[in-house]
Amino acid sequence: MRRNVSWLEMVRVLRYHNTNCFFVESTLDHKLLAIDAGWPSTLHEYQREMKKIGLKYQDIAWAIVTHFHMDHAGLITDFIAAGITCIVFENQMRAIDAMEKTILKNNKDYRAINKPKLITWQISDSREGLGKIGIAGEVLRTEGHSPDSISFLSDQKEVIIGDLHPIEFVMPDDEKSNQSWDLILAKGGENIFPSHANAFRL
């Protein structure tokens, strides 16, 4: 059963172009972990929308993406140029080329991601890595939407799920989506943050 989330604990939400981007604040230095990185060629708009929710672009220190599609990772090149540490996981690197091929069909000015500048983490090490930067949570491999999809689970049981299909719409034969939701539920996920809908509570 869905119940709308009327309060937030760790997660802050920015919405533009019908896509949600998320931020979690470090307990060590109050810098931000950005989760998903907007649309290509929209940096100024992204910065403006951050101001509207009381956040500063220069406070972003790290970034991860739920998956490498253009509405979730379009600004990674800009993030790298700004000195933001951009983290990818072992199931994600191969998806970058396909995303950029799609972007370049309609955006010839797009600059490709400098892959050597990306920092690769193992999903199994995500809790330790996030802990070192003051973020209490972990990354889950949730491949229901695409092979490179991940979700972020906070210790407050907030889950940023990217484009994972809502649990009530998953068909019995959709093995990957069912496995993803089984993992989220087994980890105690309660407050769910999709990329293209309002947050809700399980």
Image (spheres, rainbow, N blue to C red):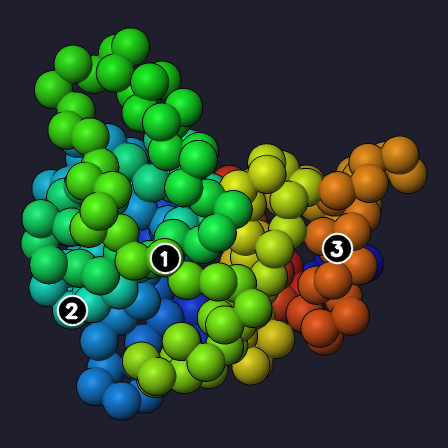
Give the class, few, some or many, for how many residues have Cα within 10 Å of label 3's Cα (few <14, many ≥20). many
In the image, 124 versus 20, the foreground residue is 124
Question: Disc 1 to disc 2, how far (Cα)?
Answer: 22 Å
Query: Which residue was labeled with disc 1?
Result: 120
Give the class, few, some or many, for how many residues have Cα within 10 Å of label 2's Cα (few <14, many ≥20). some
Q: Quick one: which residue is furthest to the right in this view?
A: 172
Q: Identify which residue is drawn at 79% across, 59% down.
A: 182
Residue 185 seen in the figure: yes
- Secondary structure beneath dot 1 equals strand
- Tell me the kind of residue under disc 3: Trp
- Secondary structure beneath dot 3 equals helix
Query: Which residue was labeled with disc 2?
Result: 59
- Secondary structure beneath dot 2 equals helix
- Tell me the kind of residue under disc 1: Thr
Residue 158, quarter of picture: bottom right
Question: Disc 3 to disc 2, how far (Cα)?
Answer: 32 Å
Q: Is residue 191 above or below residue 198?
A: below
Nearer the N terminus, badge 1 or badge 3? Answer: 1
Query: Which residue was labeled with disc 3?
Result: 181
